[in-house]
Amino acid sequence: MSKKISVGTAIALIFLAIAASVAATFAVSMSMYNRLIPNLTDRSDMYNKLENLDSIVNEKYYYEIDGSARNNAMAGGYVDGLNDAGSFYMSADEYVEYDSILRGKSVGIGVDAAYSAESGGLLISEVYTGSPAESSGLKQGDVITKVEDEAVTAQNASEKLEMLQGSRLSSVKVSYVRGSQAEQSVSVAKGYTAQTVSYEKINNTGYIRITHFYQNTVSQMREALDKLAAQNILSLVIDVRQASEGDTQYAVSTADLIVPLTEGSALVTAYDKNEEVYRTFASDANSVSYPMAVLVDSGTSGPGEIFAVTLRDFGAQLVGQKTAGVGTMSEVFQLNDGSAVRLTVAVLQPYKSERYDGVGLTPDIEAELTQEQRENLKLLSHDADTQLQAALSYLNATGTSQANVQ
């Protein structure tokens, strides 16, 4: 038999339910409000400042306002205010160039060069295969004396090098000398597929140099490993000194060509500011099993560091000097107008090692270069490269034996 309750009791129960619901809603709202208040206050101050500034500029500024330039500068200033070198704003045109470079499509002429006081110009240390520079006849050892008919000096060398590598011009006039020959001039177009990996055999050791970690670095690294394996190398030196540009994904994928399949955890894990997993990087079964050394220095940063520490987690020795300590991951977000912002979004946790962001990686074998040698690393001969020699000495001391690519 069902029990009946009075109308008064029913009304009282309804009010109690309503009160409980209101109390719960109020508690949740207060919690959200308390979390938002600091951001709301900060945003209010920001909007008020911009509104105040905009009002004054529109009323008092004498010249015509370029809205696009102003908005780009404003967005750039906002990101600059984060005080994070890994985060920056790009206009729509800059983002197109950035995306192209990250995919391995260079906007330069295809040379590595550095100013040589002895030669009095930009000494070419490498001409990339398939580049416009190679097609134009430039060769390793040539000295670029003029760029766009202006002489190269110690003071303007960086600017002239940027003219060879950047997108400021679609082509560039280069004057150069080769040995004792008379100065020659050639107009070189820009734009080619970047060669980020170079390799050679030094006695029984394979030497691989990685300059950047772009999308095509993975395929170039795979080719380098295959070609060196065919030459029956017994050990491997990988040079990532001054390697800082590129993307975490491509750096880990390049390392994955070398290290074995991991079990139980990711090869690398990225954690966001709440210490929640932002992204994991898994490994596959491909690997090589050579005794290995990785050359690092203070210019080894970001992608270069996660590559180096991943190899060390599987037995490679780091040789050289302490790295920069950029153990974070960045991600690019495109805005509605085609511009974009790159933001630091997570900290990286290597497979075995401790996090190194802000600390850097201390080499297992320390070897110094002089300031002059560091500045002219691309021009340094193998015999004069004390860090490379330290790596080769270590590998020789291990009594290297035949290794197979699996």
Image (cartoon, rainbow, N blue to C red):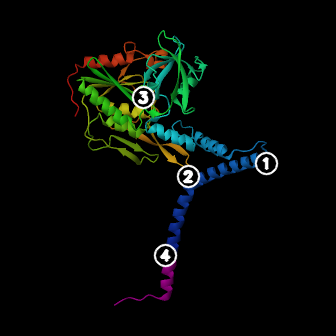
Mark nearer the N terminus (3 vs 1): 1
Which residues fall within the magenta stretch? Answer: 1-17
Amino acid at dot 2: Asn
Which residue has dot 4 on it?
A: 17
Please name the residue that numbered disc 3 is placed on: 211
Mark 3 and mark 2 lie on one chain; the one further toward the N terminus is 3
N-terminal-most mark, 1 or 4:
4
Residue type of the residue flagged with mark 1: Glu
| Camera-nearest label, 3 or 4 | 3
Mark closer to the chain start, 2 or 1:
1
Furthest-bottom residue in this view: 1
Disc 2 target residue? 336
In three-dimensional space, the C-alpha distance between marks 3 and 2, rounded to whole angstroms, equals 33 Å
When the figure is inspected, residue 35 is found, relative to residue 405, above or below; the finding is below
Q: Which mark is residue 34?
A: none
Tell whether label 1 touches label 2 (CB within 8 Å). Answer: no
Q: Main secondary structure of the magenta part?
A: helix
Pick whichever, 330 or 89, lies toward us: 89
Q: Is residue 146 shown left or right of residue 318?
A: right
Nearer mark to the viewer, of 1 and 4 = 1
The quarter of the picture where the N terminus appears is bottom left
